[in-house]
Amino acid sequence: MSISCSNCFSDSDLLCVEDTSGILSGESPEYSSDLDSSSPSDDESIAGLIEDEHNFVPGLDYLSRFQSRSLDASAREESVAWILKVQAYYAFQPLTAYLSVNYMDRFLNSRQLPQANGWPLQLLSVACLSLAAKMEEPLVPSLLDLQVEGAKYIFEPRTIRRMELLVLGVLDWRLRSVTPFSFLDFFACKLDSTGTFTGFLISRATQIILSNIQEANFIAYWPSCIAAAAILFAANEIPNWSLVKPEQAESWCEGLRKEKIIGCYQLLQELVIDNNRRKPPKVLPQLRVTTLTQMRSSVSSFSSSSSSSPSSSLPYKRRKLNNCLWVDDDKGNSK
């Protein structure tokens, strides 16, 4: 379904003239978030995070745009699946993957892409993952090496850097987001004061959160609520533990809402218990390559042009195409 493009970014937005090679390159200084999985240990600090978390989530109408199909939920799901595959490939922290999706959702909440899917969304996914990796990872792959695990399009580093700048502008450079991982330690200790199962609770809750961030319905819940529901769900998987009810989590900290936690917990039940909720990732039959000139033309006309080359599961080499982009060739030969 087509989308309204009255607020879409222009060609000048995407392909700005600044030289960003020294700003957002792979060699830039590393940054680390102060809101990672090491949560503050006191109630007041956690309450402060709950009070501030609304600044790092999409607006209230973002989910309704997926439900009305003005945004493509399947395209978002595919992008999140790709981010998770790259996170696993490079053994990035779970926080890096979550932040990537958070940046993408916040951007899409504020700006419309020229197309609901295709190369604009892939470019946004790469840029968000790159920014999140620079925030959280001690070692970050080059922008070309980041585009692995079935990326449908391969972009020039300078194109990705320009998209990074656009994302930073839309997010007002607010990258140190409050996430569910900001609360897991605290909530686990509230539930298990002896510390016997704290490690399991945090580890399992992390798995639950990552395995379900593709689901658009989770956008309705804020990070503290997701963290509480995930910890509760993990607790109820421990044998011989008395049943822990979602209503109990409201007392963990000021600002938690019982109704939201129950709703999020029920959604987790529907998704986690259903082993068939996710289909295996599709094997992409082609690798499409979009040149810089084509991109400029596509953004202006809100359509993309691309050339295709067969892909293969065999080892491959990368070669440069027309001094613009890189294309994967299973034999490393010119076509």
Image: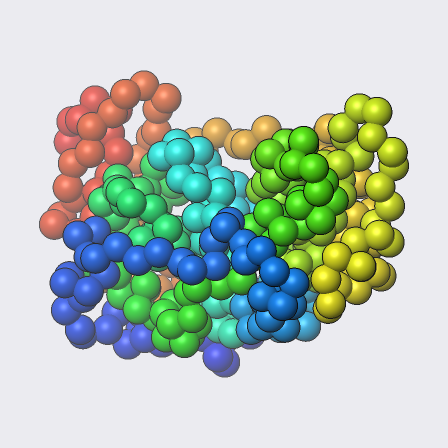
Work out which residue is located at the far bottom of the displayed protein and give it: 6
Q: In this rendered view, identify the residue nearer to me: 277 or 23.
A: 23
Q: In this rendered view, identify the residue nearer to me: 63 or 218.
A: 218
Residue 187 makes an appearance in the image: yes
Q: In this rendered view, identify the residue nearer to me: 280 or 202.
A: 202
78 relative to 239, above or below: below
Work out which residue is located at the far top of the displayed protein and give it: 314
Residue 11: give x, y in percent of width and height: 31, 73
Q: What residue lies at 54% left-to-right and 68% top-to-bottom?
A: 56
328 relative to 222, above or below: above
271 sits left or right of 81 in the view: right
Residue 333: give x, y in percent of width and height: 16, 27
Q: What residue lies at 54% left-to-right and 62% top-to-bottom?
A: 178
329 sits left or right of 286 in the view: left
190 sits left or right of 92 in the view: right
40 sits left or right of 120 in the view: right
86 relative to 109, above or below: above
Quarter occupied by residue 270: top right
Quadrant in which the C terminus is drawn: top left
Residue 296 makes an appearance in the image: no
197 relative to 180, above or below: above
Q: What residue lies at 42% left-to-right and 65% top-to-bottom?
A: 175
Quadrant in which the N terminus is drawn: bottom right
Residue 297: give x, y in percent of width and height: 30, 67
Q: In this rendered view, identify the residue nearer to me: 153 or 111.
A: 111
How many labels, in total? 0
Q: What residue lies at 20% left-to-right and 34% top-to-bottom?
A: 318
